[in-house]
């Protein structure tokens, strides 16, 4: 009987932690797939592939060709297209699948949040008066700030924003989390930030800016997640490991 073959769609801290936990297992054959959007991704603890699959049908074909037994979607909570493709591919190929989705943030006492449903609506919500804006949404959609050139933007991303924004006042900050509260407080004070625009990604790696905003009374325009796909989900790596054990045991009983 062969080992249970698992494909993890990754790119998050949780996917790396899951890979680390599974790497020593001799009963599993793991492949971690990255979308290839990060220029210099960190080394991974299990065999890795990079790049897309060609949509849901391409992913389903890969799952069949590679005899994958279990698909785990551990991508970023805002990677909606990838997640939708994963759910469809699992259905097309008839294999077991689940998502590892970190819980979203919820406002605490003292937070000044305005919730919106998209990056474009977040930029529009900045209003007509010039503001110092900390744009913490990654580089893929930063270009949407071009629609409101009146503001000064401080754009933080892991990799450079290409092409650069066309707004007259923009400063780029290249950094990778996790971020410390004291550093976020210093950054917000140093640049006299009026408002933070961010996505409700959840997790602890980038939460310090939310805590810092709360302490300083800085407004946060929070881009909320779209409705989840139909794939079953767990919220922690520990829950994912338990589900993997259960599914692997079921596959062994069936002689797969």
Image (spheres, rainbow, N blue to C red):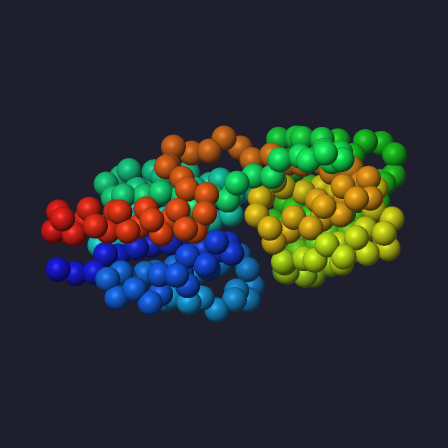
Q: Residue at x 52, y 40 (%)?
A: 103
Quarter holding the N terminus is bottom left
Q: Quadrant of residue 22?
A: bottom left
Q: Residue at x 43, y 51 (%)?
A: 237
Q: 236 or 120, which is in the foreground?
A: 236
Q: Is residue 62 visible?
A: no
Q: Is residue 125 left or right of residue 236?
A: right
Q: Is residue 209 visible?
A: yes
Q: Residue at x 25, y 44 (%)?
A: 95
Look at the picture and state if 5 lies above or below 211: below
Q: Is residue 62 left or right of residue 224?
A: left
Q: Position of residue 68 (x, y in %)?
A: 25, 53
Q: 84 or 31, which is in the foreground?
A: 31
Total of numbered circles in the picture?
Answer: 0
Q: Position of residue 112 (x, y in %)?
A: 76, 34
Look at the picture and state if 255 lies above or below 231: below
Q: 9 or 168, which is in the foreground?
A: 9
Q: Position of residue 207 (x, y in %)?
A: 65, 48
| Residue with the most extreme front position | 109
Q: Residue at x 75, y 31 (%)?
A: 125
Q: 96 or 186, which is in the foreground?
A: 186
Q: Quadrant of residue 122?
A: top right
Q: Is residue 138 left or right of residue 4?
A: right
Q: Is residue 131 left or right of residue 251?
A: right
Q: Position of residue 242 (x, y in %)?
A: 33, 49
């Amino acid at each position: 009987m062969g080992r249970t073959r698992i494909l993890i769609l990754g790119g998050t801290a949780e996917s790396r932690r899951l890979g680390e936990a599974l790497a020593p297992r001799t009963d599993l054959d793991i492949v971690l797939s990255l979308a290839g959007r990060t220029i210099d991704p960190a080394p991974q603890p299990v065999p890795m592939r990079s790049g897309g699959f060609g949509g849901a049908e391409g992913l389903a074909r890969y799952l069949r060709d590679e005899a994958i037994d279990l698909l785990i979607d551990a991508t970023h909570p805002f990677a909606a297209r990838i997640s939708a493709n994963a759910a469809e591919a699992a259905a097309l190929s008839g294999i077991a699948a689940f998502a590892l989705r970190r819980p979203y943030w919820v406002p605490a006492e003292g937070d000044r949040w305005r919730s919106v449903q998209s990056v474009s609506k977040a930029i529009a919500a900045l209003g007509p008066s010039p503001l110092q804006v900390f744009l913490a949404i990654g580089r893929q959609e930063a270009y949407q700030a071009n629609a409101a050139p009146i503001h000064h933007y401080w754009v933080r991303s892991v990799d450079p924003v290409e092409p650069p924004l066309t707004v007259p006042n923009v400063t780029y900050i290249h950094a990778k989390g996790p971020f410390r509260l004291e550093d976020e407080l210093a950054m917000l004070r140093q640049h006299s930030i009026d408002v933070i625009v961010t996505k409700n990604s959840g997790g602890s790696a980038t939460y310090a800016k939310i805590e810092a905003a709360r302490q300083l009374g800085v407004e946060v325009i929070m881009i909320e997640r779209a409705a989840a796909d139909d794939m079953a989900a767990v919220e922690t790596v520990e829950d994912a490991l338990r589900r993997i054990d259960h599914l692997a045991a079921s596959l062994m009983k069936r002689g797969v």
